[in-house]
Image (tube, helix red, strand yellow):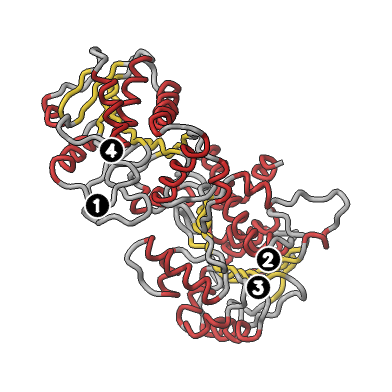
Amino acid sequence: MKIFLASQIKKWDSFTMRNESVSSLQLMERAAQSCVNWFFNNFENKFSFSIFCGQGNNGGDGFAIARLLYYKGFDVTVFTDENQKFSEDTLVNFQRCKEISAIDILDFEQVNDFTFKENSVIIDALFGIGLNRKIEGKIATLIKFLNELPFPRVSVDIPSGLMADEMIDENAIVFKADETLTFQAWKKAMLHPETGVFCGNIHIMDIFLSDEFNSSEESNEFVTGEKLIHKIYNIRSEFSHKGTYGKTNLAAGSYGKMGAAVLATKAALKSGSGLTFILAPKCGYEILQTSCPEAMFINGGENHIINFDFEEDAVIGIGPGLGTNFQTESAFMEFLKQYKKPLVIDADALNIIAKHTQFLKHIPKKSIITPHPKEFERLFGKTENSFERLKLARQKAQELQIYIVLKDHHTQIITADNQVYYNITGNAGMAKGGSGDVLLGIVTSLLAQNYSPEHAAIFGVWLHGKAGDFAAQKFSKEAMLPSDLIDEIGTVFKYLN
């Protein structure tokens, strides 16, 4: 799914109206109806809705929602400022609400004296995606008051106070939604940690904007959806053999960190690698041969890897549990200087490069690196926030002609040609040591199976997150382990098939 800027969504509305003979008022009604359908499916009639409406079209959506909820039999109260200058369509829907005597319309300032019912739901329709300034004054005070109420809070299109495409001021006042009903497409602010935290659960409301515009309008930012994954995923041929699915060779582990090598190796095997090799120190020989009997062991040293001699024609993934022993460091840098094929690099391998940033230029083109925010900072420098970090990552991916998997709640895959894919699988239960080792094994395995670097990164991150979602369902976010992700990889493939 494409991510559009707020300005592009405005164009999308206009294109739909112009080419499909739909008025702006009819479009507003569609938006309101989609929200009311959601409310009807998620709340019983005993709930009472308090709807806070601004002067722009987001407020118009709110007034229309109030009217339609009333027609569905719900108890509805509207809060607004009748003295503000409403947009044309908003004024129409405000007047329609006023004509219904059973809908109480109160001023914002009356909220302090209002007695909310125990089964109240708060709907935020104050500001939409057109907001381009910090909220101040009485509306800021109102939002702070609403955020303290002990009732479910739902935002229409976007929580008031967020800007659709940008970072907000650290002291900004923002409505804290439990649910956000956003129209037609994801907004960038919903996908970043500093701003997405205000959105709660996000629901995409289809209001049937033009498919033609969606197909033709350019964007270089996307949300990875299952439709794309099905296009990428290669179903295995019945007329195939182990050689069909490539050789995966991981370099992982050191004394005391062999668990990382086990996790990465098992993940590679479970992800479909035809032949899997693990280059590790001799101290991990028994551990690996016992826990991963399907993998072949290559001795890389005594307690640390000190020589990077890999299986011929294998795709290489380096980093989990590698350590930063000076001999390992020296051997890895020597290997990096002479190796020219795409690699997958994570963890301590990235930390070694970060200590010698002149070696960034030696990362082979089309390689995939998978840093978490702190590793990214060590490699490329500190940034103020995740929006700035993404901007820098795009610059570095183009400059080095590599793929950067920037791990976060919504991990971003940044391609060498300046495209960004936000992943929306995964959950907080994956925030545990070892999850990244599993990801490296998956991505390296997919690359070995002849997926392109771009597709290996996109599919690998999605697969990793989806396995995490299945594991959370089975064990809970608190109790699930990275090894549980590996066990659920098969569940994901069954789901895809």
Residue at the spot of label 4: 56
Considering the numbered disc 1 on the image, is that residue within a helix, a strand or a loop?
Answer: loop
Chain-order first, disc 1 or disc 3? 1
Chain-order first, disc 2 or disc 1? 1
Residue at the spot of label 3: 342
Q: Amino acid at mark 2?
A: Glu
Chain-order first, disc 4 or disc 2? 4
Q: Amino acid at mark 1?
A: Arg
Q: Can you tell which quarter of the image residue 105 is in?
A: top left
Q: Are the two marked residues, 1 and 3, in contact with CB atoms closer than 8 angstroms?
A: no
Separation of residues labelled 1 and 3 (CA atoms): 44 Å
Q: Position of residue 472 (x, y in %)?
A: 52, 41
Chain-order first, disc 4 or disc 3? 4
Residue at left offset 67%, top offset 72%? 279
Considering the numbered disc 4 on the image, is that residue within a helix, a strand or a loop?
Answer: loop
Residue at the spot of label 1: 133
Q: Amino acid at mark 4?
A: Gly
Residue at the spot of label 2: 286
Q: Can you tell which quarter of the image residue 341 is in?
A: bottom right
* Visible residue check, residue 483: no
Q: Amino acid at mark 3?
A: Pro
Q: Position of residue 37 (x, y in %)?
A: 44, 24
Q: Are the two marked residues, 4 and 3, in contact with CB atoms closer than 8 angstroms?
A: no
Q: Residue furthest right?
A: 239
Task: Report the side of 313 relative to 56 (left or right).
Answer: right
Q: Are the two marked residues, 4 and 1, in contact with CB atoms closer than 8 angstroms?
A: no
Q: Are the two marked residues, 2 and 1, in contact with CB atoms closer than 8 angstroms?
A: no
Residue at left offset 49%, top offset 66%? 371
Instruction: Give the quarter of the figure containing the C terminus.
Output: top right
